[in-house]
Image: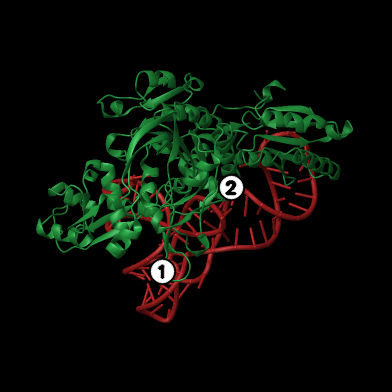
Amino acid sequence: MSEHEHAAADESTTEATSEKLVELAKRRGYFFQSSGAYGGVGGFYTFGPQGASLKGNVEDAWRDRFAVAEGNMEIDAPTIMPEPVFEASGHLDGFDDMLVECPDCGESHRADHVVEDNTEYEDAESLPIPEVEEVIAEYELVCPSCGAGLAGQAVETFNLMFATNIGPGDSDPGYLRPETAQGIFVEFPRLKEYARNQLPFGVTQIGRAYRNEISPRRSIIRVREFTQAELEYFIDPEEDDPDLERVADVEVTLYPAAEQNAEDGSPIETTIGEAVEEGVISSPWVAYFLGVAKPWYEGVGVDMDRFRFRQHLSGERAHYAADCWDAEGEIDGNWIELAGFAYRSDYDLSKHEEYSEDRFTIFKQYDEPKTVERATVDPDMSYLGPEFGGAAQDVVDELEALAARDREAFAGETVAIELEDETHEIPVEKTGFAVEEQTEAGEHIVPHVVEPSFGVGRLVYTVLHHAYREDEVDGEQRTYLALEPEVAPTFVGVFPLQSDDDLETTAREIVDDLRGAGLSVTYDDSGNIGRRYRRQDEVGTPFCVTVDYETLENEATTVTVRERDTTDQKRLPIDELAETLSAIRDGELAFEEL
RNA sequence: GCGCCGGUGGUCUAGUGGUAGGACAUGAGCUUCCCAAGCUCAUAGCCCGGGUUCAAUUCCCGGCCGGCGCACCA
């Protein structure tokens, strides 16, 4: 401990921490509402100098762990994509909300829900708007809140995607992606080439996504433009298993659906290995990434006492997702979603396979080639052409289909095909019908995808919140951010003890030296030394170096290094400074060991 | 989107039908010299639009923004 009075910070976080943090963030440049000069705009935040740096460091840490260390590729796709992409992804329809407002009490309700709850319609969301309005009138549906009639009220759609136009005019609509993942799925046909058509492989992307939220809330937690770090891990569901050994011993707090539904349910403490064995986590792939994520979250500074993995309840899960877990962090008593881990099966790639001309499949070679007997046709176009004119190609398609499903149809002299309700007799000899043995080397499969999807802004907020501390030093109140050195915006502050040319010169030399070693350094020579320490405490700088008169007396050999959380000080030789501090930053050395 | 409450220097806030005061922060100087010290000076503010009024930061209406509740959150 320091020679100074130093109170413990255990009880430092209170309900009001969020308020204090938001104020600090604004004042010190972590984040603030955007476009303030024009009245501000809801749901958009700017990361200031400190925040941008912290966010960048968090992203770098994520990249190191989820791309580099896992051997995955990273891409950077556009945020705007054309309409067909979102027709395929389902966002154009599925992201639509139908809202109807009560004329009496003013409450807005999901029109499709009102219809589904009170009629025999089961999928009201797929009905066109006018029809929903008709149904509401016909059944004389009422407001769920106050009971007033809703007939005659306009049903309005609200799509959470931001729309724009690509190029001049409005003939080519585009949308800002509502999740960064879409860029990975869309580029899959090319990405699989880079993976040399071998499963499994993973692709990451860190980037912005946009949702035109009806009501952005709670500072930076729910915004309209946000950064996601996503990994799409493509696997062959029949062949690929994760290396669970590597994470089996990771201890986790799990909050399974069963516990959430139980009267007195509560989160359970277990390990990844046990959770998989006991079937708590059904997908080993999801389990694997939970096991990777937990230590990573700890490393960037999330308080593990306020962290858990919560399983989605069946109702909140997308229909295609077999199992889904969220990473959650606690903020002032509320659990907020930090990441989602979903086993999405082949949903995304199948949709694009269906909507796009491109192939979203992987060719999977059999161990042994298979020999199959197959009926084929090779029609004589010099006959079919003149005979059927423009319909000739349709005839060929029909013949191919017929050969595949009923080769007996070709047993006679002629074969009958149905074309637009007419039956045509075609001489079999003109069809080139044959039954051949073919060898198949493999098949095209649609990979399944495991998706760990991280919210970066929310994580930055959580890291700041969990790092917020208040204590007392020498009877003076102090506020500081106990940020992990790996992510702190500034790693070291360098000060001359007071205004003095010699002290300042030496201090500036040290700044250059440390920056040359790749450290993030700030220099400050204003006012009192204590004030400068507090300033750095408040932005979370882990270390401060002070040049004093002892430094000068000994021909500039040693300086004071002060640690943020304890305010302890040690004297270090200047020429070892860069090396020692780098080692501390990289976790190879602890300040106490000096 | 609805309801309630709110919006005053960078931050936090006092106050007013006659254009505003404090604290902290910031900058300069003096002083001091290892934990927000002192003194002097300086910079800097009534969210936007309309209305009422001789006069609006203040009252009224609308908007924007924020907090909370409801709804929403693929």
Residue drawn where x is 46% and y is 64% of the image: A166
Q: Is residue A460 visible?
A: no
The residue at which mark 1 appears reads as: A170
Q: Nearer the viewer, residue A202 or A225?
A: A202
Q: What amino acid is found at the position of numbered circle 2 in the picture? A: Ala
Q: Classify residue A143 as left or right of residue A594.
A: left
The quarter of the image holding the C terminus of chain A is top right
What subunit carries mark 2?
A
Q: Position of residue A505 (x, y in %)?
A: 84, 43
Determine the secondary structure under disc 2: helix
- Residue A471 seen in this snapshot: yes
* Colour of the chain lettered B: red
Q: Position of residue A4 (x, y in %)?
A: 66, 27
Q: Quadrant of the N terminus of chain A?
A: top right
Q: Which chain is green?
A: A
Q: Classify mark 1: residues with Cα within 10 Å, few (<14), some (14-19) or many (20+).
A: few
Q: Which of these two is toward me, A344 or A196?
A: A196
How many C-alpha atoms fall within 10 Å of the one at disc 2: few (<14), some, or many (≥20)?
Answer: some
Image check: A136 left or right of A48?
Answer: left
Q: Are marks 1 and 2 on the same chain?
A: yes
Q: Residue at x 70, y 28 (%)?
A: A583
Q: From what the image shows, is residue A3 above or below residue B68? A: above
Badge 1: chain ID: A
Identify the disc placed on residue A584: none
Nearer the observer, A136 or A574: A136
* First reached walking from the N terminus: tag 1 or tag 2: 2
Q: Residue at x 51, y 22 (%)?
A: A246
Question: Residue flagged by tag 1: what amino acid is it?
Answer: Asp
Rounded to the nearest angstrom, the CA distance separating label 1 from label 2 is 35 Å
According to the image, label 2 marks what residue? A52
Mark nearer the viewer, 1 or 2: 1
Q: Are marks 1 and 2 in contact (CB under 8 Å)?
A: no
